[in-house]
Each structure stands twice: as structure tokens, then as C-alpha cells.
Image (cartoon, grey):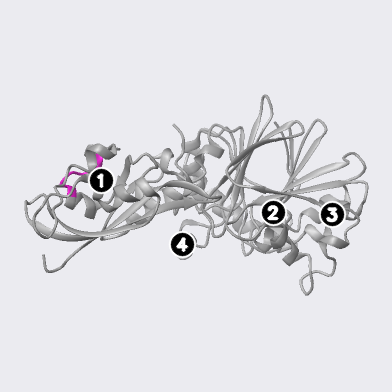
Amino acid sequence: MSQQPLELILARQFADSMTMAVFLVDPEGNLLFYNEAAEDILGIRFSETGIMPVGEWSSIFKPTDFDDNPIPPSELPLVETLNTQRPAHGTFYINNKKEKHVSITVTSIPIEGRPDRYLGAMALFWKSPES
Amino acid sequence: MKVTVWGCRGSLPSPGPEKNKYGGNTSCVQVEHKDTCLILDGGSGIQRLGASFGEKYKEVHILLSHLHIDHTMGLGFFLPLYNPNVEIHIWGPSTTIEPLLQRLRRYFSPPLFPVRLSELPKHPVIHELSNSEFTIGDLEVKSNYICHPGPTLAFKISTENASFAYMPDHEVVLGSANFPYEPEWTSGYDIAKDVDLLFHDSQYRSEEYAARVGWGHSSIKDSVEFAKMCNVKRMELFHHDPLHTDQQLEKIMSDFKSQVKTDFPVELCAEGNVYDL
């Protein structure tokens, strides 16, 4: 077993200490880690899933726009960041594990480490207090 | 491979009669194998090394783990730097913006130091490192970034039948998830795994570390847990706190050994120690 790059190790530590949901993926889109707040959104504990490929995690929650139209996985900010290696941002609705319709805003950023290595991406989820 | 310790004190040179046994010079370790000579860090210990350098080596490679002052302060006092017959190579961590040469020039310039790099009889050859694997003479070297403020490298030095890991400044717990149970998510694991000899930051007692989280150093307890996880054959506790006297270090060590058992030797590193691997 090989060690993850230091930048991803520290990103995971950062995510682990946040109360907002954080997803961490590698350059191929494999979901390497999600924190406790993200477990609440996904409805599955990380210890139960382990690493998930992009096709799997991006279809777990059913995102919809303000008019309740389904949003395809490719338009999720984190998937967009994976495809473009650029930051992405979006607000949409999801059904959480309690089947409650909640509004979330997501900002995702590429993780670039020394020296100019693309190592994956991180997404931070902010849940609207009104939802 | 022969490993000689010229300085193992952390943060600040702290000589004095109460520190004679473990020494007051800051980080400097010499690694020799056949015709190759590496020097790990240029702390104050490099001055004594330079004074006894002799004529054996016409080429020497100084590998800097990082550029904090306790790891670079001795460079200008390393006599072979002023000998035009010796070729000096300086290797150090790459950063995002500023080249290593420019960062070294900050030290080799007034008001910090009177002699500029360009005024040396032979300009050192500068090499930037990141997560790298390379060969210097008869030695294989691997460098990886590890958890410490600012770009900081750990080194693994190998021959065909021996390996040595050097991690003088490393806050292993801060850079690790679920420590010490997930090697994949532990800073430094790839460097220290299965080595014959590990020098690792052990600056604090556990209660001292609790008040210094984020400063970049480890407690003895965490360092030893890391060594266990990495399955090392032997460990030397390195980068002693400048305030810890010989007597205090030995008390800390005996308290620790009464609580924690290991199946490999764990000792306090001392200036002057020599290890044949």
C-alpha cells in the first residue's frame, strides 16, 4: 500500500474537522473521503462505502434545479471541476436521507500541489438554513 | 553506509555543560558510502564537520530538508565551501514561486551573512527537489514532502543492502488521519516504511505537544507510534528541544520506556553517534 500525497492527507484532515460537508476526490474522480456532514447528505457512512467511483457517488443523490428538473451528474460542480480542472459553483436541491428536499450550494476547487501537480478536487457543501 | 551525527538539537543551538551528552548543535548528519558523501542539513553541527572534512572527498552533496534557520545557519561556516577544489551541490525543497537559489541568497547576503554565494571561490550547484527519486554517486535517494510548516522534505537514503530515513522536523499526527491505523493517510509513511534506521522528530513530551499543535514537531509517543506503523528496525529520537537538558531527556526517555514497549530499539540520538548500516 502506498501513501497518499501530503496535500490530500492534509485536505482530508481539513475535511474531517469541518461541520460543513466536504467531498475529496482523486484525479480520476474516485471519492477518497467524505466527512460526517457529507454522510448526512449521502445517507451512507464513509466506513460503509469506502472509495467510490465517480459514476457511483454522482448518482446517489438526485439533484434537481429550482423548477424540480433533474440535473445530470456531469453538471454537478465537482464533476465539472474534475472535467475542467477549474473551480465550479452551483446551487440546487437534493433529497437527503430523510427524503427532505434541501437547498445546497456547492463550491468545488481543483487541488494543485507542489510542483504543479494536479492531485484531485475538493467540494464544500453549504446547506441553506431556510431549507 | 556510515551515518555520523554532527548535530541533533532542534530549533536553536543550545550548548552548555548540562547538554554535553546529547549535544547542542542543530541538525547535521553525514552519510558516507564508498566514494559518496552526503550531508543532511546545514545546522550548526556542519561547522565541526567542515573543520574535520579532510581531503577525501572532492564532491559533497548537502541535502536540505527545509530552510528554517536551524537547518541552514551553519552553511556559511562549512569550510569546504571556501575550497575551490571541492564541488558543493546543494539540494533543497522546491516551492511554488521562489527558486531555491534565490531563497539561499537571502541567507548568503547582508545583514545575515557577509559573504554572498557569488563571492565563493566556486559557486555551489543548486538542485530543486520535490517528491523525487534520484541517485547521488553510490546512494539512492528518495525525497517526499512531509507535514511541517513551509515546504519540508524527508529523505530515504538506500544502498543495495541498507536504508536510512531522515525526518528531523515532522508533525506526524497533524498530517495523518486516524493515526496510527491508516498508513495510506499518514505523512511520511512512504519514506520510513521498513527502513533499517529512522531519525525522527521527537521534540516534545505529550503534554508539551498539546500546547504546541501546528508548530511542526512531534511528541516522543507519536514518533514511536509512527515508527511502529512503519515497521522500522531501529529508531533514534532526533531534534531534541533546546530547553531539555541531558538529565531531563533521560528522565523523559525512562518514563516513556516504562509505559511503552517496542520490539525494536528506540534511543535518544546524540551528537557524535556513528551508525554502520
Residue annotated with mark 1: A74
Q: Is residue B72 left or right of residue A21?
A: right
Residue annotated with mark 4: B213
Q: Which residues are magenta?
A: A42-47
Kindly report which numbered mark, 3 or 4, lies closer to the viewer in this rendering.
3
Q: Amino acid at mark 4?
A: Val
For the C terminus of chain A, the quadrant is bottom left
Task: Please state the chain letter of the residue tagged with numbered disc 2 in the rendered image.
Answer: B
Q: Amino acid at mark 3?
A: His
* Residue neighbourhood size for the residue with mark 4, other residues' Cα within 10 Å, grouped as few (<14), some (14–19), many (≥20): few
Residue B179 marker: none
* Residue neighbourhood size for the residue with mark 2, other residues' Cα within 10 Å, grouped as few (<14), some (14–19), many (≥20): many
Q: Is residue B75 above or below residue A84?
A: below
Q: CA distance from mark 4 to mark 1?
A: 40 Å
* Observer-nearest of B135 and B158: B135
Q: CA distance from mark 3 to mark 2?
A: 23 Å
* Observer-nearest of A6 and B46: A6
Is residue B80 in the magenta section? no
